[in-house]
Image (tube, rainbow, N blue to C red):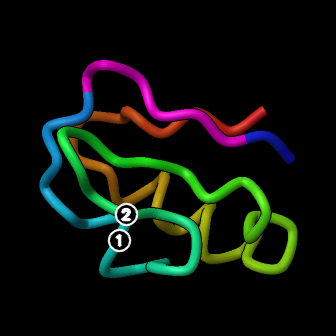
Amino acid sequence: MSVKVTDDCIACGACESICDAVFSIEDKAVVNESAVADNEDSVKEAAEACPVSAIVIE
């Protein structure tokens, strides 16, 4: 699974609150790629919760 955050990100923190092992907020959400495989369900939940659909899962 590959996870990207688009420039649409508004840094609201929803993804970080759901899965802080993978997402952290700077100017926009940043993905810790090394933690994605162990947290796939939470990553999907975070993507669904994103208010601007900025999290892309491939």
From the viewer's perspective, is 47 left or right of 39?
Answer: left
- Whether residue 41 sits left or right of residue 44 in the image: it is right
Residue at 25% in and 66% down: 14
Which mark, by number, is residue 24?
A: 2
Read off the residue under disc 1: 16
Provide the secondary structure element on which disc 1 rests: helix
Q: Residue at x 78, y 32 (%)?
A: 58
Measuring from the top left, give residue 37's x and y in whole percent. 86, 67
In the rendered image, the vertical position of residue 8 relative to residue 58, given as above or below: above
> Could you tell me residue 26's position as x and y percent?
23, 50
The crowding category of the residue bearing disc 2, from other C-alpha atoms within 10 Å (few below 14, some 14 to 19, many at least 20), is: some
Q: Which image quadrant is residue 52 in?
A: top left
* Numbered disc 2: secondary structure: strand
Contact (CB < 8 A) between labels 2 and 1? Answer: yes
Left or right: 15 in relation to 34:
left
Q: Position of residue 47 (x, y in %)?
A: 49, 52
Q: Total number of numbered labels?
A: 2
Instruction: Look at the picture and state if 7 lies above or below 36.
Output: above
**Chain part drawn in magenta:** 3-8
Amino acid type at mark 2 = Ser
- Say whether residue 5 is magenta: yes
